[in-house]
């Protein structure tokens, strides 16, 4: 569904970390440390940033790309690396592979993933050459079992659950739309259907998050903005950004009232990078609404 009512257009967000990574992604609020975690996927780095000061440290570096993170219920983290999901302790020292995603080809890697309200971890993949249909979308349960939710995916990306747990929002980026599933009482999904179709030229949906009012915030890769949609798919507002490749969003801060926005310069030409000197930076915006606490695995 596309917008048919007036849209509130807001000014650009504030820079929190200047050009933090080539493909800055996957922001995750960690209430245990009071910092927001985010990734530079191709560098295999996990950063931790204070949302007030912008002070940033690298807490983990892998020997390959890292695609996503989640909090573990019993402490530490879950990390999507290569084609497997691993656990890592709270000091980012002890890394243990937990499960390998089935059916993945050598040139695929994990992309976006999140824990759900029932303690499972949902994660998808992409092919490094971005070819259509080579990826999948999975659910990893706390006992280590994995179920394939979708095959024939191209770039598995943003996902988030409604506050009442009745809906899962999800996008396969090249479709240029956000889909919605119905969710039953134990977290299983069914009845996938299109909800939002993007009309911005060159833009596709990337990471997304849900606020406490049930509205969907989505980063528009190639679109230079973040959008907020109503639960029924109407465009409500947008935050204009100073760079085109907006990669993901999450709510952070003790009151979950800070919208953290990641961006990228991955794939940009020299001239495009010169025109977008803040590409790859991490931004903050204060939207006047709050997000939901991050769910945990386990």
Image (spheres, helix red, strand yellow):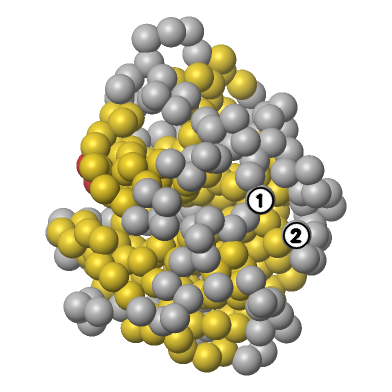
Say few, some or many: other residues with alpha carbon within 10 Å of mark 1 (under 14 / 14 to 19 / 20 or more): some
Q: Are marks 1 and 2 in contact (CB under 8 Å)?
A: yes
Can you give x and y, in whole percent of width and height, for residue 140 in the image?
39, 72
Residue in the image at 84% along x and 52% along y: 53
User: 28 or 215, which lies in front?
Assistant: 215
Q: Which residue is mark 2?
A: 31
Q: Which residue is mark 1?
A: 293
Whether residue 74 is visible here, answered yes or no, is: yes
Say few, some or many: other residues with alpha carbon within 10 Å of mark 2 (under 14 / 14 to 19 / 20 or more): some
Which disc, if any, is residue 148? none
Residue in the image at 55% along x and 40% along y: 163
Element carrying mark 2: loop
User: 111 or 264, which lies in front?
Assistant: 111
Q: Which quarter of the rendering shows the N terminus?
A: top left
Q: Is residue 138 above or below residue 208?
A: below
Tell me the CA gap for discs 1 and 2.
Answer: 9 Å
Q: Earlier in the sequence, mark 1 or mark 2?
A: 2
Task: Specify whether 14 is left or right of 79.
Answer: right
Residue in the image at 48% along x and 76% along y: 142
Can you give x and y, in whole percent of width and height, for residue 178 in the image?
33, 38
Task: Specify whether 193 is left or right of 60.
Answer: left
Can you give x and y, in whole percent of width and height, for residue 187 in the image?
41, 56
User: 298 or 160, which lies in front?
Assistant: 298
């Amino acid at each position: 569904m596309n917008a048919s009512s007036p849209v509130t257009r807001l000014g650009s967000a504030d820079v929190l970390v200047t050009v933090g990574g080539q493909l800055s992604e996957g922001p995750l609020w960690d209430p245990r440390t009071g910092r927001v975690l985010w990734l530079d996927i191709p560098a295999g780095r996990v950063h931790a940033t204070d949302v007030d000061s912008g002070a940033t440290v690298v807490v983990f570096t892998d020997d390959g790309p890292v695609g996503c993170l989640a909090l573990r219920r019993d402490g530490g983290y879950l990390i999507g690396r290569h084609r497997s999901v691993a656990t890592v302790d709270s000091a980012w020292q002890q890394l243990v592979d937990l499960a390998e995603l089935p059916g993945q080809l050598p040139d695929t890697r994990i992309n976006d993933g999140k824990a759900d309200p029932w303690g499972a971890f949902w994660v998808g993949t992409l092919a490094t050459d971005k070819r259509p249909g080579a990826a999948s979308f999975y659910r990893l349960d706390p006992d280590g079992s994995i179920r394939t939710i979708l095959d024939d995916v191209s770039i598995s990306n943003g996902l988030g659950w409604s506050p009442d747990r009745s809906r899962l929002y999800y996008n396969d980026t090249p479709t240029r739309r956000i889909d919605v599933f119905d969710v039953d009482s134990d977290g299983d999904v069914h009845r996938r259907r299109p909800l939002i179709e993007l009309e911005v030229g060159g833009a596709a949906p990337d990471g997304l998050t849900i606020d406490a009012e049930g509205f969907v915030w989505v980063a528009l890769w190639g679109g230079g903005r973040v959008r907020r949609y109503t639960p029924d798919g109407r465009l409500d507002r947008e935050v204009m950004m100073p760079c085109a490749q907006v990669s993901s969003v999450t709510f952070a801060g003790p009151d979950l009232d800070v919208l953290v926005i990641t961006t990228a310069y991955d794939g940009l030409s020299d001239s495009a990078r010169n025109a977008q000197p803040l590409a790859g930076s991490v931004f903050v915006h204060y939207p006047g609404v709050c997000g939901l606490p991050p769910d945990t695995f386990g």
